Amino acid sequence: MKFSEKNIRIVVNVLKWFYLVFIILTSITTIAFILLLLNGPPKNVSHYYSLITGILLLLTCIALYFGLKKRCQWIVPVMVILTSLNIVILIFSSPKDLPHVIATIIGMCIAGFEFYFFTTKEVRKYFKTKGFYLFG
């Protein structure tokens, strides 16, 4: 399957919107965690881990959004690495019920498409990435 420049722009715009929405949602939950922590010490240490995870996720989404928006060369190898990790994590996850199984399958399909998309030579050319998939 080959991608034309128009199709690449469409997929990149969809990904930019996805990460923008994710930035907004992650910002809201991170602010909520901070407000909860300001009201008093948590009874569980996992609240701190959730806050750290939320901040890291927020920073990652911001970097991916601006990398896609500015058509940075580094976005291709980063997306290949992140989607590979996502696929591995989803393969080894153990969904407990049917909605989690469906979400895992959908997540694997999306990550698989992103992996395929960012490894095509048309997309690497669009982002001006030279060389092999991870090095350029």
Image: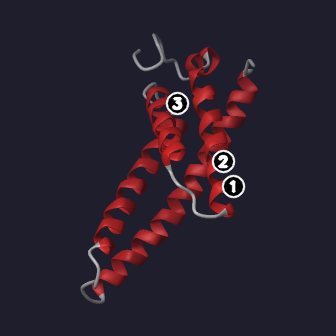
> Which circle marks residue 60 in the picture?
none
Query: Which of the marked residues, 2 or 3, is nearer the chain's N terminus?
Result: 3
Residue 134 percent location from the top left of the image:
43, 20
Considering only vertical position in the picture, is 97 above or below 89?
A: below
Say left or right for 109 vs 65: right
Scheme of colours in the image: secondary structure
Q: Amino acid at mark 3?
A: Arg
Q: Quadrant of the N terminus?
A: top right
Q: Nearer the viewer, residue 40 or 12?
A: 40
Q: Who's the residue at 50% across and 51% down the image?
A: 93
The number of discs equals 3
Dot 2 corresponds to which residue?
105
Q: Who's the residue at 47% across and 49% down the image?
A: 61
> Which circle marks residue 102 in the picture?
1
Residue 21 percent location from the top left of the image:
59, 58
Q: Who's the residue at 57% across and 26% down the image?
A: 118
Dot 3 corresponds to which residue?
71
Q: Amino acid at mark 1?
A: Ile
| Secondary structure beneath label 2 | helix
Q: Amino acid at mark 2?
A: Ile
Mark 3 vs mark 1: give the one in front.
1
